[in-house]
Amino acid sequence: MADEPQPMTEPEFWEKSAQRQYIRDYARHTRTSPDAVLGAILARIATVTPPNVVAPAFTGAFPSGLAMYVAIVGSSGDGKGLAEGVARKLIPDLLDAGETLPVSGEGLATLFAGRRPLPGDDGESRNRGTEPYCVNQRALLSVPEIGGLGATMNRTGSTLEPVLLSAWSGEPLGGQNVDENKRLRAPSYGYRLNLITGVQPTNAGILADRDGSGLPQRFLWCTTRDLGAPNTRPPQPTGTFTFKTDRLKELQPTSLTLNVLYSAGARERMTKPESGGDPYPLHVMRYPNEAYEAVDDDRVLALHGQRPDGMDAHSLLLTIRIAGLLALLEQRADLLAVTSDDWRAAQWLVGHSIETRTRCIVDGRRQRRSKRAANRADELAADEAANEQAREIREAEKLERAKKSVLSQLDKHDGKREGVPGSTIRQYLGRNGRYAYQAIEALYDDGKLDLIGGDTGETSSRLWALAAGNPAL
């Protein structure tokens, strides 16, 4: 259509928003990657956004949360930690979010859910059992290297991968323990889990190889590179970064309301107030028509069996989520409104993420092939060196046998020490004859043979005899 908006370009992405432009300029001032800093900032915004702030259902399903998983791509020492540090400086307050590293899938539920004794009539515990409650409604996990996460996911019986998938989708976390007093469960819309991890290209397969489960598709892939970084360090941008966590804090449910949700286990099981209102209201963000049209087109393709396969098949879900977080980054008067520009910016960022992910996977495969080739070359070189050493040992052993045989044959055939031609000695040695001349010269150097008739001619024509006073054996 003629009036359809054109895709956003990279300069537009950074310059069409004062907030994003500040992030880019501040990152360049601190000599970090704007892309990596923005990814870390979006994860922090998702963390301070209450779990009851959601994206609409779009196609009639339940509203979805705004959890954010970020993969920062770069080699060791390229600046993943620096990017997180800059993001922390711009958004320092995470409203007491949990930041414990994941040890297991079961352990993630303990970030949010706990149990406490039921109070007695006098306000004290009287062995009346326990009740669930909300320990924390938000968490941001920072995993320095994806290899650590991969090692945990690869353990036999590990549930970390499926739990991470469920947490991104906002599904309930926790198992159904037989002992009710040990049962921990974080209900939907009662928690928000976010994750930042570093990915070296050689380890990209830890995520990429899980594309069947949809794990790599859930990540925003950012790079530690900035090809547009100026050679001269730019000054700190003027003005201030205007993101304030307090505006989002105003939307979050009270501790009492969260505890009631955790006790009920789901919004649908909460007791409605007498007024008939929602006991746990959700704040649903409002998206532009372009988002609804994109979702509808995607559903038609899925129903017709024409949706593309591979890791790009679920990019729309990530686009919806990022558009909401970009809108929250702006902190406009209407906090929950997502504009057409937010949507176009999210489309550009997801496209850039796909390019970063693809480049990371390709680079990783190339580096692994090069490493395997280098290792193979080292193995071949080591094998060749070992073979050469073995050959030298065998040759030395054969030479020693030839030397003993030369002495023995001369003692047998030249008892008067008149001298025997080298060629004849060679015939005496039979199969060891190829070492005859080398053995003769070595014995002569050692003083065990005498040269008869002068030093003329070749070894084969000279006359050789046992040295005087030197027994053959």
Image (cartoon, rainbow, N blue to C red):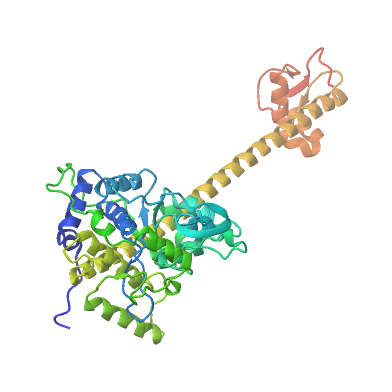
In the picture as drawn, the residue positioned furthest to the front comes out as: 122
Question: Residue 360 vs residue 464: left or right?
Answer: left
Question: Residue 349 vs residue 155: left or right?
Answer: left
Q: Position of residue 5 (x, y in %)?
A: 17, 75
User: Measured along the vertical axis of the image, is residue 347 above or below residue 78?
Assistant: below
Question: Residue 133 vs residue 438: left or right?
Answer: left
- Res 362 visible: no
Q: Position of residue 367 (x, y in %)?
A: 43, 53
Q: Position of residue 279 (x, y in %)?
A: 37, 71
In the picture as drawn, the residue positioned furthest to the top comes out as: 469
Instruction: In this rendered view, identify the residue nearer to me: 9 or 14.
Output: 14
Instruction: In this rendered view, identify the residue nearer to me: 257 or 444.
Output: 257
**Residue lying at 62% horizontally and 64% vertically, measured from the top left:** 178
**Residue lying at 75% horizontally and 22% vertically, measured from the top left:** 464
Question: Residue 296 vs residue 471: left or right?
Answer: left
Q: Position of residue 158 (x, y in %)?
A: 57, 59
In the picture as drawn, the residue positioned furthest to the bottom comes out as: 304
